[in-house]
Image (cartoon, coloured by chain):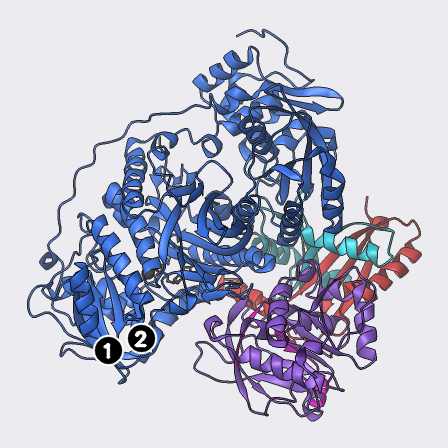
Chain colours: A purple, B blue, C red, D cyan
Amino acid sequence: MSLSALRVAIIVFPGSNCDRDMMVAIERLAGRRPALVWHKETSLDPVDLAIIPGGFSYGDYLRCGALAARSPIMEAVLDHAARGGAVMGICNGFQVLLEAGLLPGVLVENAGLKYVCRNTCIEVVGGTDSPFTAGLAPGHRMIIPVAHNEGNYFAGDEDLQRLEDNGQIAFRYVDSDIVGPANPNGAARDIAGIVSANGRVMGMMPHPERAISAELGSADGATMLTASLEALIS
Amino acid sequence: MSDIMTAPHQDPAMTFENAASMGLSREEWDLILTRLGRTPNLCELGIFSAMWSEHCSYKSSKKWLKTLPTEGPQVIQGPGENAGAVDIGDGLAAIFKIESHNHPSFIEPYQGAATGVGGILRDVFTMGARPVALLNALRFGAADHEKTRHLLSGVVSGIGGYGNCIGIPTIGGEVNFDASYNGNILVNAMAIGLANSDRIFRSAATGPGNPVIYVGAKTGRDGIHGATMASAEFSDETESKRPTVQVGDPFTGKLLMEACLELMASDSVLAIQDMGAAGLTSSSVEMASKGGLGMEMDLDLVPAREDGMSAYELMLSESQERMLMVLKPDATDTARQIFEKWDLDFMPIGKVTETGRLVLLKDGDVACDIPLAPLVDDAPEYDRPQAEMAKRPTLASADITDGRPVTEVLAELLGSVDLASRRWIYEQYDSQVMADTIAPPGGDAGLVRIHGSRRGLAASTDCTPRYVEADPRTGGAQAVAESWRNLSAIGARGLAITNNLNFGNPERPEILTQMAQSVLGMGDAARALDTPVVSGNVSLYNETDGSAILPCPVIGMVGTIEDIGAAVGMAPTAGMALVVIGQTAETDDGWLGVSLYARNLAGSPDAAPPPVDLQAERRNGLFVQQQIADGLITAAHDISDGGLAVAVAEMCIAGRIGAQVALPDGGNRHGWAFGEDQARYIVATSDAGALLAEAKAAGVPAAAIGSTRDAGELQFGDENAISLEDLSNLVEATIPALMSGG
Amino acid sequence: MQVIVNISLKEGVLDPQGRAIGRSLTDLGFQEVGEVRVGKRISLDIDETDPARAEQRVARMCETLLANTVIEDYEIEIAGENEA
Amino acid sequence: MQVIVNISLKEGVLDPQGRAIGRSLTDLGFQEVGEVRVGKRISLDIDETDPARAEQRVARMCETLLANTVIEDYEIEIAGENEA
Ligand SMILES: Nc1ncnc2c1ncn2[C@@H]1O[C@H](COP(=O)(O)OP(=O)(O)O)[C@@H](O)[C@H]1O
Ligand SMILES: [Mg+2]
């Protein structure tokens, strides 16, 4: 089956601002334009992947992702996940997935107490059988930018240990020659992204959709997204 | 003065004292009485004072602004609309403008800066353009001044707070520090958008009878002129101290932007105007007067956030995220649906009329009825006097230099706040959202890809206030030239500019001279470089305790590059020759007058700034653009603050590569290294011979001065080499140390 | 009726903002300042006259939206009763 | 001694956050919710035994750092006295 057979939906909340970027990236990599689904919808047509994009859903008011997580469409996303459907949340999307309870932990304000936008180097950890890491070798390194104010992953020690033991840590920030600390936000155990216990739900702070060609600074995001799409189709 | 006719509504009739407290002069007050044929009421007087304020009427600057070149084959819309528009080919227009938010940012740095960004974005999407890039130009007081840290951190997080949330990348800007800004910082924000060139929206109202629609957020009492509100005699209700700063809501701003763009894609909008300074007043007056028509509005219909708002308050509120539109008569339902989908207020509040008057109803009564013509056409225009300026002497390098090694001075300059890395600032801005950013902040110009194409849009903001102070005409021209150079250095061709004139009190002749002469210089340069002025903004009275800021006419230039793949950065690779463009091999001294060297190391001796040769700027810039397009130049950086040595060091730091640079045999070593002669670039090439031959053929001075090398050290002649890592740490440490109080 | 919800970080959860404020205060010469913690205070106008019922509804709001009970505690004050 | 500072937006200052929260609560079925405003609640451990003096010092902290008096009001509660 070719990638263009894959049905992808991108959920759009008021204040989402990476929805178009993700749509463009997926269309380029898969050859088919994903559907944009407005948050007021209450159902989701059958899809192979639901993506919650980055941005400032509801202005990031109250807590990042909190208001979006209670939006009408999220029932349908929860149902989709409960059936084993794949869900990917990027940046604000990751925050939404945590607020919706699809992934454990919370994302709190960056340790530097400032918004940070720059490249980071992340390493594939993997371990769980997840479509989001399956096509990437453990230890594979990628340059992917972050842009957020609340990317500091926090969970209790037991939860962190469980994530570690279950192989649910998908990506970690690692040292590189990029100016500034490897971990841009103080995240516990340098966590950049995690997956659910069954590997089908993934959230990450870095933006792969912004790193899809050398001209944009890196094409590693394209590698990562393509690997995920391929794993989902097979 | 007797009432010829009673003013409408129950509002008290005004006196000259009232007018004076709103900033109007005796002559202006008399003019209002004559034009109106009676005394105005509070609401009417408020409208006059707002429309005749310096901000809306440009009364002190108009005479000079008129001298600027505003036309050219590329210009679709010059000054006069919400933003300027230039043709960038492929049926597209770049729409852009810069605007100041200096005073609010000093009072409340976060909100002041945030609403500055929000305001300039509205100016751009009002014209039907989707914003694609933001830039800014900032001036703070001395780095060690007690307020600087607080103001800088607030302004930067405010700019980021709005731009990041609404999802427009910030791709460039500039920051200077000088004690003259201790009590009056400058916060200028620029936005660039893209639209189809045949789908540009303007503000002139058309079609009497057509509905006037209010959309966006509700109106509150924020931003109403503080001085006016404090005067108890204007209002019988006891005023608590109302905030005079507005609070931005980027979330609503984003919804408003999406809703407006969605509506504009349908065929519904006849005219549209954002509510910026003086809110509903300036938007309604401008729309009606530009259309040569009148307008009638029922203020009871204006969506209000608070109860009991008076006509005066409703008309002068500067609440954010609001727009006024004239729709086609049958389009109201379509429009309403769109705004409701985005959870925004949508309210028909009036209609276009043929009367040439602004008529406002409140509580079923007439609250204002004034002819529009005087508000706009009779707005005062002043020809204020200038002062004689003594010509400054040319400084001899030998008078201020010593024999210290170049690298030692270099380290000192690079560690200063003037040249230190701005990373701490620009990493707080989302520079990559929209996934089209080719060159984020950190290089000479920002560059975004025109979505879905191979072409790029480049932009830079620039001004060197110390040059403007020393010689306004040269300084005005230099600001344009530096922007042009910053674009050329990445391979882009400047197309047009916007400007933000930040000066002190124009009623002082020496300040008027600064403004007038720098505008003339700006015009000279804009003509020579074919970069007409398409929009701009004026901010005067930037003073504290009678001392003015260093004059700061900021230029924002926008240009294009045909193939983003051909654009270069300033990072050279190993084994490259370094060539200086704009200077010959024989040059062994440079212009230190008013340089950063003179200012930071020699106590700013009185001197003339480097002259600006516009023909050389043009020729050298076009040459660099061409050689970048042809691939002969692989990295480039313009020479500006700090001169040649600083430019080379910045390239080495960017490329993480060392270099060996030859020193001239004679002349003045520091003058050569740190002089700020204009129209120059350092470029890297793998074929110096070919590049020098091209330069010779084009009549462009050029000389090979050295080459990059892997050793990780920068060396001038046989002086001690300096480690690149040390230089890099130096440059990166300064602002973080300043901001952490170190 | 006005109801106030005070939301604070659970004990043991790191509060970098509070720490930064504490440090700034000490730098500014307020040597007496020890730990600083920052929470939220949300005030709600509730169309409800029975305080018990108001409290119960607001508790529901906290559980569903206002607080993230993974890291936050909340406390409800019925302000309408005590105040003018 | 524990001192609490409640910081709220001045009346008339737009509270976009409060508005967004209010709308979400209504959408979630809490129809009784009217205006919502969000403020900060800062708790400070102060090494000081005299409540009057503590209050005076904290007021100074509010003016210099904790509150932005252009748009915010503050209110000081000496918690140590009334509570356990
Ligand atoms: N306020 C700012 N916002 C965003 N980027 C900035 C800001 N100030 C400086 N920069 C970026 O830092 C780099 C260096 O700035 P500057 O020294 O002013 O450049 P130049 O001398 O080439 O005009 C540029 O890329 C500029 O865009
Ligand atoms: Mg430059």
Is A144 a magenta residue? yes
Which stretch appears magenta?
Answer: A143-162
Does label 1 or label 2 sit earlier along the sequence?
2
Q: Which residue is mark 1?
A: B659
Specify the quadrant of the image occupied by residue B576: bottom left
Q: Secondary structure at mark 1?
A: strand
Residue B379: x %, y % from top left: 46, 24
Q: Nearer the viewer, residue A52 or D11?
A: A52
**Residue at position x 37%, y 35% from top?**
B65
Specify the quadrant of the image occupied by residue B245: top right
Residue type at mark 2? Pro
Q: Which residue is mark 2?
A: B572
Asked if residue B537 can be seen in this view, the reply is: yes
Residue B642: x %, y % from top left: 25, 62
Specify the quadrant of the image occupied by residue B372: top right
Q: Are marks 1 and 2 in contact (CB under 8 Å)?
A: yes
Q: Nearer the viewer, residue C24 or B268?
A: B268
**Residue at position x 63%, y 42% from top?**
B322
Residue C9: x %, y % from top left: 71, 70
Residue A97: x %, y % from top left: 73, 73
Residue B18's place in the image compared with C56, above or below, is above
Instruction: Tell if the residue under mark 1 belongs to the same chain as the one under mark 2.
Output: yes
1 vs 2, front mark: 2
Is B216 a magenta residue? no
Q: Which mark is residue B293?
A: none
As measured in the structure, the alpha-carbon distance from the residue carrying label 1 to the one carrying label 2 is: 10 Å
**Residue at position x 66%, y 52% from top?**
B255
Instruction: Using residue B513 as the reference point, say whether residue B296 is left or right of it.
Output: right
Residue type at mark 1? Ala
Q: Report crowding for label 2: few under 14, some 14 to 19, many 20 or more residues within 10 A (C-alpha).
A: many
- Count of numbered circles on the image: 2
Quarter of the render that holds ligand 1: bottom left
